[in-house]
Image (spheres, grey):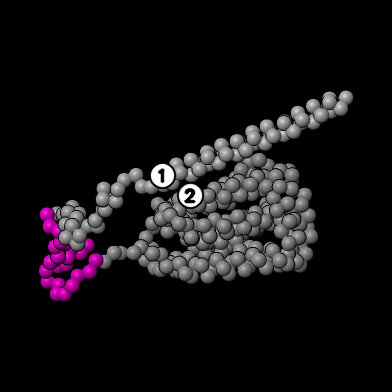
Amino acid sequence: MANGIFTYGKNIFEGKSSLKQQVTGSVEFYSQSAYDLSASLQITQQPIFAADTVTKVQPPTKAQIRYWQWQREKNLVVGDSRYMEPRGQVKLGTEVPVTHQGLGLPAHKREKLHTDWLTILLLLILVLFASVRTYYSKYLVHLFQSLVNYSTAFRMFREKNYSGLHAAFRLELFFYITFSVLIFQIINYSNINFEKGNITLYLVCLGGVFAYFFIKKLVYNILGSVFSGVNETREYLFNMDNFNRVTGMFLFPIVILITFYPAKNPSIPVLAGGITVFVFYILLLQRGITILMKKQFSIFYLFLYLCSLEFLPLLLIYKIVVV
């Protein structure tokens, strides 16, 4: 048993010695490999080409740069020359008469309609409408309702309070001024010759509008008293004033658009103004027929009434102005 232990221990020592030899051999092998690798790297770091074989690029000389610039300047020519030729004569836009002495400058005629006074007038109209809108807003609501509701119009006709009368007067004045501006603009659009100035023409239009409605109301009252229809006539005239006041409010933005229209020919807003007046006039005639039919008025006299007081004056005005 002792021999067995000795043998085992001997083998252990022999195994250790052999393992030490193997490790030592491996270390020597890797050391030699690392040395060979470093030697190879030192060899590769050396330049491949010799310094004598490298050619250096020389910068261009001043003579070469001037030559290249000259070649580019040959393409920048004006006609057949590299320089711009001065002009001895200057031609203007207009011809100067031979008898005229001195320098003649081009003159362009500028077509401008002096309507500064019209701008001030539109501002005054706007202030007038703003006063009604601020202090009599309830009246404006009833006024618009009276156009589509006959009972509202009849109630306004019966009441006639102070605030309503005051607002009605302002809006009626608003309509007369605005409608006169529209007629003035239509005359200018139609190129009707008028010897006086624009302000005089507008005053003529304003006077004509006042005279037309004054005479119309006067004739209506006379015929109403003759045919014993005073109440019906007054009610119709009251509705006519209501329609005129609302018409003025619709015409106001149209006349502003015509005044400051960007194009030279304001045919579209002028046509819109004419259509607005025509539509409210038809609504007024319908309201007049409704009033007279409720009073058991004869259809024959109704037709004669409207033709003599509505259509005939318009035909006469058309014949006087246009023909």
Farthest residue, direction front: 3
91 sits left or right of 32 in the view:
left
Residue sitting nearer the eye, 313 or 210: 210
Query: In the rendered structure, which disc, 1 or 2, sits on the residue that comes first in sequence?
Result: 1
Q: Residue at x 48, y 70 (%)?
A: 117
Residue 228 in view: no
Q: How many dots with numbers?
A: 2
Residue 175 in view: yes
Image spot of residue 228 (x, y percent): 71, 53
Task: Report the magenta residues as a range.
Answer: 80-106
Residue sitting nearer the eye, 92 or 158: 92
Q: Secondary structure at mark 1?
A: helix
Residue beneath disc 1: 43
Image spot of residue 193 (x, y percent): 37, 60
Residue beneath disc 2: 268
Residue sitting nearer the eye, 322 or 311: 322
43 sits left or right of 168 in the view:
left
